[in-house]
Amino acid sequence: MLKTTNIESLPDEIIFDILVRVPAQDIYDATRLVCRKWYKIIHTRDFIRAHLQQSTCGLLAQYLAFKKPQLTFIATGKGQIEISKLNHQFRRAVSSCNGLVLEPHDNHRDLHITNPATKQHFALPPFLADVVPYWYAIAYAATSMEYKVVRPFFHSDVILGSRKFESQDDCVAILTAGVDKDWTRCVNTQHLSDAAKELLGQCTLTTEGFVHWTRVNYSDIFTLNVETEVITQSRVPSLQHDDKRLRYYYLAMGSYLSLLIAHSYWSWEVWEMRPETGEWTHMPNIDVEPQKVLRHLSFKLNPYVASSCWLVPVGWSNFREVLVFQVDVDIGTPQRFHIAYNVRTQEIDSIGLDFNISSFLVHRNSLVWLDGW
């Protein structure tokens, strides 16, 4: 007769090694039902850190057509694509860092930090009522082990419909989550021109410890180091192409920022920037074979109208390894689907999303909360 194994008697290191491989959304609820020892282990900083480091980095796909946005997590690894819908009812996800999602209220002034895997929520202090906040971002300051939220804002002239600045220092507010009680602290922008400050109203991009602002065909990129709270200005690579029809795509890629320049619907020039220095490195170009993509269409497309199909890069999954594309097809009735392209093997897989996606965020499911890990 076999003896029943007492799970509480297993050595801590074995339990640790087992649990660290379990997805965050599964482990948090399950351990409560198993035993107190397991529950304590997953709440230690060492475990949360180890679990984060081995977790798969994917994309949070968001559809905003309904009052209750639908969010789906897409991850690629071990030769397969994993798709899971988040149970949490988000108003909207505007930024993600280490599994923490920044979620604005309908009034665009109140913000919450949410971990959808653990279902933890944290309300940030209310923002100033007389200014208009624009894009938001959350990033992790590794040295101080703090999460910081960044909110560019402008004093708007309602009559003229324009933005204005009351001083040279008042357009980027920063708050340390769980520490600061208000938004009175601002990043110094005195060294930026008014034209440069206008750029801060653009959509933000975050890499590990940094927040970035730029726009298509702009010659500079502005980077905020959330540890030092200093904004630096860097030049985009010397790409002085005469063809204004070239399309530029900036995508977060772990600790790097990537720039993809479309030379055609199927070919991209690739650069990556190290935020600490602002230096750009030219990477191998990406050239996708049209016929490989067309095989994944749910309908047949005649070769002579293949030019009506084009790819839009939307995000990296497994940084530097898999690039996710939105595929648009215009054959009278617009069609759209998504594929995962393995940069190394050039293999293509179709991503079975059942709705059109409005935006993508780099995301990983984790057990992280606002205590540094």
Image (cartoon, rainbow, N blue to C red):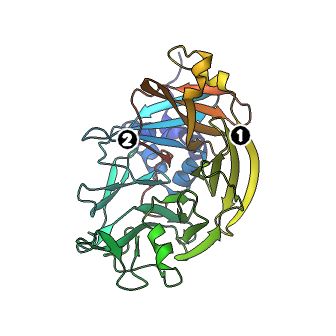
- Residue with the mark numbered 1: 286
Q: Where is residue 71 in the image (x, y as percent from the top left)?
A: 38, 39
Residue type at mark 1: give it: Ile
**Foreground residue among 171 and 88:** 171
Q: Position of residue 168 (x, y in %)?
A: 43, 84
Q: Does residue 3 appear anywhere in the picture?
A: yes
Residue drawn 69% across the image and 49% down it = 270
**Taking 189 as reference, is 243 left or right?**
right
- Residue with the mark numbered 2: 32
Residue drawn 68% across the image and 55% down it = 242
Q: In 3D space, how far apart are the residues under numbered discs 1 and 2 (Cα atoms)?
A: 46 Å
**Foreground residue among 15 and 234:** 234
**Taking 340 as reference, is 98 left or right?**
left
Work out whether mark 1 precedes mark 2 in sequence or the reverse, and give the earlier one: 2
Q: In this view, does 244 lie above or below 57?
A: below
What secondary structure is found at the residue carrying circle 1? Answer: strand
Q: Does residue 295 appear anywhere in the picture?
A: no
Q: Local crowd at mark 2 within 10 Å, few (<14), some, or many (≥20)?
A: few
1 vs 2, front mark: 1
**Foreground residue among 168 and 129:** 168
Asked which quadrant contains residue 156, the reply is: bottom left
Q: Where is residue 3 in the image (x, y as percent from the top left)?
A: 52, 23
Q: Position of residue 88 (x, y in %)?
A: 32, 42
Dot label at residue 71: none
Asked which quadrant contains residue 207, the reply is: bottom right
**Taking 122 as reference, is 268 left or right?**
right
Q: How many labels does the image show?
A: 2
